[in-house]
Amino acid sequence: MKPAPFEYVRPSSRAEAVAALAAHGDDGKAIAGGQSLVAAMNFRLARPAVLVDLNGALDLDYLRPEGGVLRIGALTRHAAFHRPVVEGPLGVLLARVVRNIAHYPIRQRGTFTGSLAHADPASEWCLVSRTLGAQMVIANVGGERVCAAADFFKGTFTTAIQADDLLVEARLPLMGPNWRSGFFEFSRRAGDFALAMSLAALEIEGGVIRAARLGVGGVADRPLRLEGLEGQLVGQAPSAALFAGIGEAARDLISPTEDIHASADYRRDLIRTVVKRALTQAAS
Amino acid sequence: MSALGQSLKRIEDRPLVTGAGRFAADERRPGQVYMRVVRSPVAFGRLVGVDIDEAAALPGVRAVWVHADIAHLPPIDFRMTRIPGLDPYRQYVLAKDYVRYVGDPVAVVFADDPYVAEDAAEMVFCDIEEEDACLDATGDPVPFMPQTLPGVLSEPACIVKAYGDLDAAFAGAAHVIELEVKVGRHTGVPLETRGALAVYDAARDVITMYGASKVPHYNRDTIARMLGLPRDHVQLSEGHVGGGFGIRGELYPEDVLVCCAAHALGVPVKWVEDRREHLLAANHSRDQVHRMRAAVNADGFILGLTDVFFTDQGGYVRTHGGTVSDLAAALLPGPYVIPAYRVEGHIRLTNKTPAGTYRAPGRYETTFARERLMDAIAHRLGLDPVEVRKVNLIREDQMPFDRRIDALGTHVVYDSGKYHDLLERTLARLDYPALKARLAARRAAGEKVGMGLAYFVEKSGLGPRDRVTLTVLPDDRIEVVTGVASIGQGVETAMAQICSDVVDLPIQNISVIHGQTERISEGYGAFASRVTVMTGSAVRLASQALRETAFAQAAPLLQTRPDDLDLVGGRVVARSSGAAISLSDLAQQLPEGLTAEGVFEADHMTYPYGIHVAQVKVDPETCGVSVEHYLVAYDVGRAINPMMIDGQIVGAAAQGIGGARLGGFVYDEAGRPFAASFADYLMPTCHEMPTVDVLLREDAPSPLNPLGVKGAGEGGITAVGAAIAAAVDDALGRPGLIDRLPISPNRLHAVMGAGG
């Protein structure tokens, strides 16, 4: 469990980091919290020739609402979200979700955008980003571009980030006062990767769902947003029967992955449960 | 006040809680080289060749060895339970001709730096002609190494034990109940992985291996024999040990390799196992299938029982020989009378990691089997599970109870026990009728809650003997030199308390030496819950001998007779005159000092017994099981330090709850392990642990030793699988639903679906 040989560079700004990645091309790999990458390197499953350590690039360390979005810089740790970071429903939602991410020490080190760049199918932040329609800001020496979450996640550990790109920021849309959220995940132990999880956000006015966001994670090669089912929620009054029905529909919609912890059949049934419970919590 | 029975704080804890512990990886010497083992990536195949050229050429690499380089080393022999027929299945320290599991050592690299060692190990190419792996221990036997050992099949032995008239039992049965159960593959997983540093002292021609644990004397003798050295030319030394659980400290290929290399290369050789290696290479355990058939009368009394079981031994037979299967066969009947019994235990080689003992070996598996059977009988006859157990329990007036079979070469005679009494006390502690009513009310309200109870008999105090020497030191200190090992269980405190009881000095004044082959001529180590029974008894005998010697020597000095003397606060005091001399002062006046020796021998084991009760809640939508409450009632005969026993029991229960719900080594069809890290081999954390209520009893002291003690190291785990399985059945209202461990949510989903 010793990594293969690698070089290490520590740029002191975003610009230097981007330049370092450009200089090393396919051989370079950015590291921020390292909570997934270092383990993979120790197993020699990841063998970057050059590690570009972002921790000295302090201009990536920011977290602020601006222009209707929450801007999350690349050095923002999971633990930053333990308390609501913005007023309103989004801060509450993020604080609700963050406690499901691994364990306290890991949350002190791992970063929000690091999770997105790693793109584990069971990552809570990937699910949040996909479900809420995050925008990813990707920089390279040529400039920067913005990529929608729908186009960002390409598969297990695979994203729109190219060899000399750096994911410098994620932007989550702020949510109006009538939004509420629910999140439920089932894992073998507290802190483990979810066997299935769901995030629901509902805008409820006058006892009727005006808008909805619904996503499922840990069941496919990437987080899934269930836009068709969101449409079925809109215009309805929240009820146990409605949510049970949406859970059933989600179950039938998805062909889940299987592994040693969950068969496809089991995961299908879990999808029904996590969706129903996330919706129920959102409406409660 | 005597120290015996007091919950004194452990004297060994200060370095451990201040970061000053010295574990295997903390041992280092100038000029040491690092060993890295190249392991087979496939489960079964003919080893055609190993290409080491690229690795050997890497700068910083001192040597690369394959089997041919150490062909003079014999395979690792059995430490215990040498059953005829096992010899061809022993493991060589590096694979010879075949690889038989993923993780089988094929080559070793020695390098100046652990990173270089790992880089070089990657460059070693193993040319293996892969063959179909055997992963089912219950199928027809298959060839072990077809080309080089033709005719040697994967069943080396079948253990048969029997007593009583089974034909009559089944002829007279009102019911015959059959049950097949399976216990999955688990292991102990100590927090500290294995590790060793071997140092060769050319001036003395002695190899010393640091990082020993469990059985240093056995391992010293075996390493010396394998290397062809006189035994005092190899010494083993134990530092702090981060857990043993039966698996740590057995003699493994790596221990022999570091010693051999230190001798051959003339430099200190260090090896520290990583977690992946640990999960692939250290002993696994459990993994049994039992097929039982019980003849039962109308009251639920078992007239006769047969069992055919299969132990999945993995790739080779290691140091334990047939121990696990032998214990399983002998102890399956547990606390019940069962007048007629026949068991047939098949030891089967497969292409998984070799198996050995893990905390309550053979008892964890058979308690699951037997107690699931008791529940099945209760269900078939429409009886309360507790009533069926009462009908079958051995009565107090039947003690000592001769089981009429052998285990580990000793005759199984339950030395003492009040089985009905412990059951009544347990039910009273639970307020059983009220608890049942409360759970029924919650079930009626829609909750899936239930409870399960399981009874078991443990065994402890395996001989043959233990030797202890005491030396009185200056400043009212006493040194106790033992031949046992401390794997974290509190040996120093327990031995000091026993010595303190006689010499009447604070336990802080008593130093206990363990795990140092250079300090004492023989030692039998720490396993089978034997230390307090065997070593503790030897400490008591040695302490009493010291007192007698002190009295004899002090009497003339104090101008009185020995029978006028008392030992108070480490001072020999004349009752008549009040004249006194401390043991330390007395020792200084004697040319030979003041020493004593104690030897305790035992040819029978002692048998503690206990009951586990689990209360669980099942979430039928997620198939998650949470343990709401857990009770362990356990009679240890006599408790030297109740707090330490409580720790043993709670820790063991945590291991058991983890194993019953989470853990498990699983493989793909080619024999590649899925669970090779803590991401997939799940250990319990505090989040998964309920509060464990410990009902510690001393109602049936052992008549077999001067302290009356029975071992306490294993009873916290023995019945966990059985109790949780029964509780899940009860919660779901589906008697007999759980017939295998672990009870993972995935598995529970599959079986819940099957019955609607």
Image (cartoon, rainbow, N blue to C red):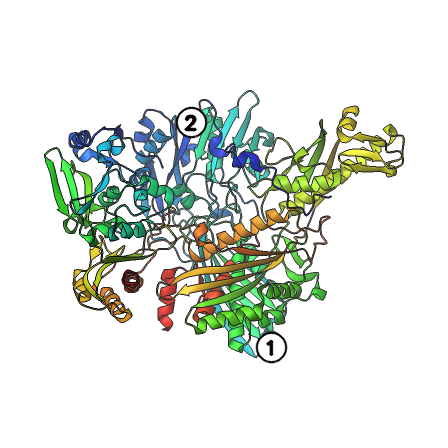
**Residue at horizontal 32%, vertical 47%?**
A83
Q: Secondary structure at mark 1?
A: loop
Counting from the top left corner in percent of width and height, residue B481 is at 66, 35
Q: Determine crowd level at label 1: few under 14, some 14-19, many 20+ residues with C-alpha closer than 10 A.
A: some
Chain of the residue that carries numbered disc 2 in the rendered image: B
SS category of the residue bearing label 2:
strand
Residue B618 seen anywhere in this rendered image of the structure: yes
Q: Are marks 2 and 1 on the same chain?
A: yes
Q: Which residue is mark 2?
A: B33
Point out residue B528 in the picture as x, y percentages from the top left corner. 59, 49
Mark linked to residue B299: 1
Looking at the image, residue B516 lies above or below residue B709 = above
Residue type for callout 2: Val
Front in this rendered view, residue B300 or B41: B300
Specify the amino acid type for callout 1: Asp
Please tell me which residue is depicted at 13% across the width and 46% down the height of the picture.
A147
Between A29 and B410, the one lying in front of the other is A29
Which residue is at the front of the view, A38 or B153? A38
